[in-house]
Amino acid sequence: MVDELTEEVLADAARGDQYALGVVYRALAPTVQAFLLAHGAEDPEDLTNEVFLHVLPRLSALKGGVAGVRTFVFSVAHARSVDEVRRRARRPRQAPYDPDRDRRAAASAEHDALDERASYLRDVLAQLNDGQRSVITLRVLADLSVGETARVLGRSPGAVKQLQRRGLLALREILEGGATS
């Protein structure tokens, strides 16, 4: 049995009969949804539900029978469609972030500041000899003990201590603006 929207069903729906309200929805919703889809609605199902949430409580006040209800339903659908178009025009279209398509080349201020400091540190350390630079970076930056540093470099702990002392003295001269060894 197919539900048909008749004057009797409409009268029952106007009195709040749940079955009759369902018939009104099932009879008109597919056409309303198609109308909204044809007008570019992003979510025509949701918009169709909005239309009927507006229409169904007002059935008792409507005049003109089935033809009047159809006219009112599509008037509301048109208004909701126009509202959606205006709402979309006011907000920018959102797209998911795709890092592969991000062509920005500028680094952040934080990156630039860290890069400047790293560059300065590299320049200062480049003024030390290889042994001093290795010991200073392992002891200070890698936080290794004298024994661990000696094992990494294949030197004695005494040699590591001597390279560290000489390296720190050289760094002091560099940072105070003097010449290096």
Image (tube, helix red, strand yellow):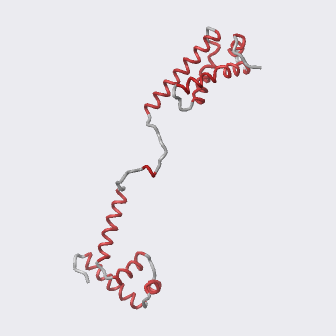
Q: In this view, does 123 lie above or below 58?
A: below
Compare residues 30 and 89 and report the one nearer the observer.
30
Q: Is residue 172 above or below residue 75?
A: below
Relative image position of residue 136 (x, y in whole percent):
37, 80
In the rendered image, which quarter contains the C terminus?
bottom left
Q: How many marks?
A: 0
Q: Residue furthest top?
A: 64
* Residue 150 in which image quadrant: bottom left
* Residue 62 in which image quadrant: top right
Compare residues 3 and 159 and report the one nearer the observer.
3
Q: Which residue lies furthest to the right in this view?
A: 1
Identified at 39% across, 90% down, the residue is 159
In the rendered image, which quarter contains the N terminus?
top right
Relative image position of residue 44 (x, y in whole percent):
57, 29
Q: In this view, does 165 lie to the left or right of 88?
A: left
Compare residues 5 and 59 and report the one nearer the observer.
5
Identified at 43% across, 37% down, the residue is 92
Relative image position of residue 38 (x, y in whole percent):
54, 25
